[in-house]
Image (cartoon, rainbow, N blue to C red):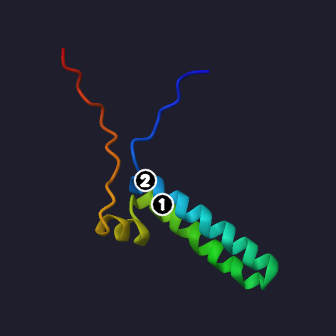
Amino acid sequence: MPNLPRHHGWTVERVVPLMAGVIVLASVASAAVFSPWWLLLTGFVGANLVFYSLAGWCPASLIMERAGLERADCRIQPTTR
């Protein structure tokens, strides 16, 4: 198995899908226990994830950045010899 990349701390790009997954699971559980209307929250989270992937930001990511969470640095770092 190849070496998998390790994450270096929590970034906005890691926390947004984590938060969305937790909310979706809670919404589905609430729909199963209380009312199917809770599935509207699941749809709202899905729409926000689509918007986040297209635009590169969503309301949650803006709040996370203002709270001090950093964006991932995906640029290739130059090697020094």
Residue that carries the numbered disc 1 in the rendered image: 16
* Residue at figure coordinates x 46%, y 52% from the top left: 14
On screen, residue 15 above or below 81: below
Which of the 4 image quadrants contains residue 61?
A: bottom left
Relative image position of residue 55 (x, y in whole percent): 40, 61
On screen, residue 9 above or below 40: above
Residue that carries the numbered disc 2 in the rendered image: 13
Within-10-Å neighbours for mark 1: few <14, some 14–19, many 20+: some
The amino acid type of the residue labelled 1 equals Val
Relative image position of residue 39 (x, y in whole percent): 70, 77
Residue located farthest toward the right when viewing the structure as drawn: 32
Which of the 4 image quadrants contains residue 76?
A: top left
Q: Quick one: SS at disc 2?
A: helix
79 relative position to 21: left or right: left
* Residue at figure coordinates x 29%, y 69% from the top left: 66
Residue located farthest toward the front when viewing the structure as drawn: 9
The amino acid type of the residue labelled 2 equals Glu
On screen, residue 3 above or below 74: above
Relative image position of residue 79 (x, y in whole percent): 23, 21
- Disc 2/disc 1 C-alpha distance (Å): 6 Å
Relative image position of residue 52 (x, y in whole percent): 45, 61
